[in-house]
Image (cartoon, rainbow, N blue to C red):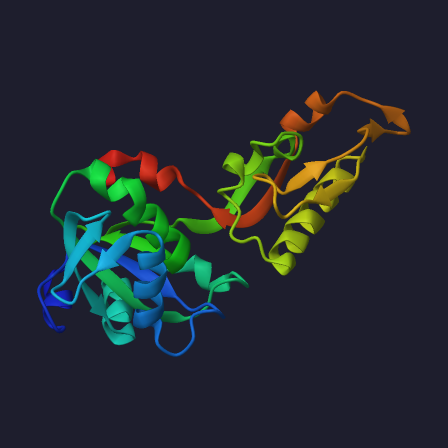
Amino acid sequence: MNPDTLAAGNGAVPSYLAIILDQPAMGPEWKSWLTHELALRRVLLGTDGAIEDAATLIGFFRFLEPQECEAVLRAANIEVHARECPWAGPVRGALGWDGAGSVEDLLRSFLPSLIRLGRGPLIRTEDGAHREPLRRVAFSLDNLTGKFGFEDGEALLSRSSDYLEYARHEAQAALARAGIEAQISVIETAHNPLRIWGPVSRNGKEVSETVLRDLSMTLWAFDWSCLRNVTFW
């Protein structure tokens, strides 16, 4: 990827970009919304361009406008599949940053919060390498059987009733395709809100929940593996 793509914008080339996708709660002022939401998570975007996590300096940032973002995406040949997700929308802009601390500092709160709020690709501008934290993710159906399923609920996009009903419907459909009879309940206050309550059966006979391990479903969800690949950062 050619760094001049960004240099033609309003500032120096940031080492990383997080593409920010539209969401209903965002409103017309996405920068103010993002700044406020990050502050609620103890990550402060200062007027001097500093990023602080719990009063520790972790980097420096600048915002990018949609036109700059689209130019970066074209130059790096990145297709934003998350735009197809009903719980994300068009590109509103990006937050670009350079780290000023350790990778551990970034991973503590800043990057998890930015992924959850922004939902778009994360791009390393040096070479155009990128990760898509919001995508269609395959899950084993045994995630429906324990309180720590779906990465303790952290893989799920939202606790909104429409998203959880979508997830419940997809899980119920996956069970039906496999000939499994079980009832999935939604408990919004639980760590894992999607749980099978009651017996699991096939052809009218109760079976062990272990049969679910080899069955899968696909959901629009967060793929947190991008944070485990420390070489990307």
Image quadrant containing the N terminus: bottom left
Tell me: residue 218, above or below residue 35: above
Q: Is residue 114 left or right of residue 12?
A: right
Residue drawn at (38%, 38%) of the image: 225
Q: Position of residue 137 (x, y in %)?
A: 52, 44
Does the image show residue 27?
A: yes
Residue at 57% over, 48% down: 219
Position of residue 141 in the picture relative to residue 72 (left or right): right
Residue projecting furthest to the right: 204
Q: How many marks?
A: 0
Residue 78 visible in image: no
- 91 versus 181 height, above or below: below
List x then y, in percent, for residue 38. Answer: 32, 57
Toward which corner of the image does residue 160 lie, by quadrant? bottom right
Q: In the picture, which quadrant includes the C terminus? A: top left
Q: Is residue 113 left or right of residue 83?
A: left
Left or right of 45? Residue 217 is: right
User: Percent position (x, y) of residue 118?
Assistant: 37, 59
Quarter of the image holding residue 35? bottom left
**Residue at point 31%, 58% (across, down):** 39
| Residue extending farthest bottom | 28
Near-viewer residue (87 or 70): 87
Residue 119, quarter of the rendered image:
bottom left
- Picture layout, residue 215 above or below residue 34: above
